[in-house]
Amino acid sequence: MDEEGNRMEFGALEALMLLDILKNEESNLREMADSASPLSLNLKV
């Protein structure tokens, strides 16, 4: 739960579906995060 009282709850099937979507979109999400980063230094893990 965050400071605003928002909460996300998923069942097992929903969590697996979300994980699959995030895995498929990982490279796009990383590119978006890198381009939006205000830091001039990028750390790769």
Image: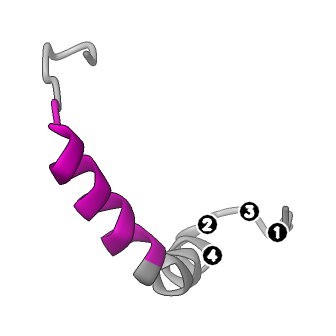
> Which disc number belongs to residue 34?
4
Q: Secondary structure under badge 4? A: helix
Front tag of 4 and 2: 4
> Could you tell me if the residues under marks 3 and 2 are in contact, i.e. CB atoms within 8 Å?
yes
Residue under circle 2?
A: 37
Q: Residues within 10 Å of mark 4 (few under 14, many from 20)?
A: some
Determine the CA span between mark 1 and mark 3: 7 Å
**Above or below: residue 5 compared with residue 10:** above
**Disc 1 on helix, strand or loop?**
loop
Number of other residues with Cα within 10 Å of mark 2, as a class: few under 14, some 14 to 19, many 20 or more: few
Identified by mark 4, the residue type is Asp
Q: Nearer the viewer, residue 40 or 10?
A: 10
Query: Which secondary structure type mostly characterizes the magenta part of the structure?
Result: helix
Residues at marks 1 and 2 touching, judged by CB atoms closer than 8 Å: yes
Task: Please tell me how many numbered marks the rendered image carries.
Answer: 4
Report how far apart the C-alphas of labels 4 and 2 lie in the structure.
5 Å
Disc 1 or disc 3, which is closer to the eye? 1
Asked if the residue at tag 4 contacts the one at tag 1, i.e. Cβ–Cβ closer than 8 Å, the answer is yes
Location of residue 18 in the rendering, given as x and y in whole percent from the top left corner:
27, 60
Contact flag, marks 1 and 3 (Cβ < 8 Å): yes
| Residue nearest the observer in this picture, 4 or 12 | 12
Which range is magenta?
9-23
In the displayed structure, would residue 10 be above or below residue 7?
below
**Amino acid beneath label 1:** Asn
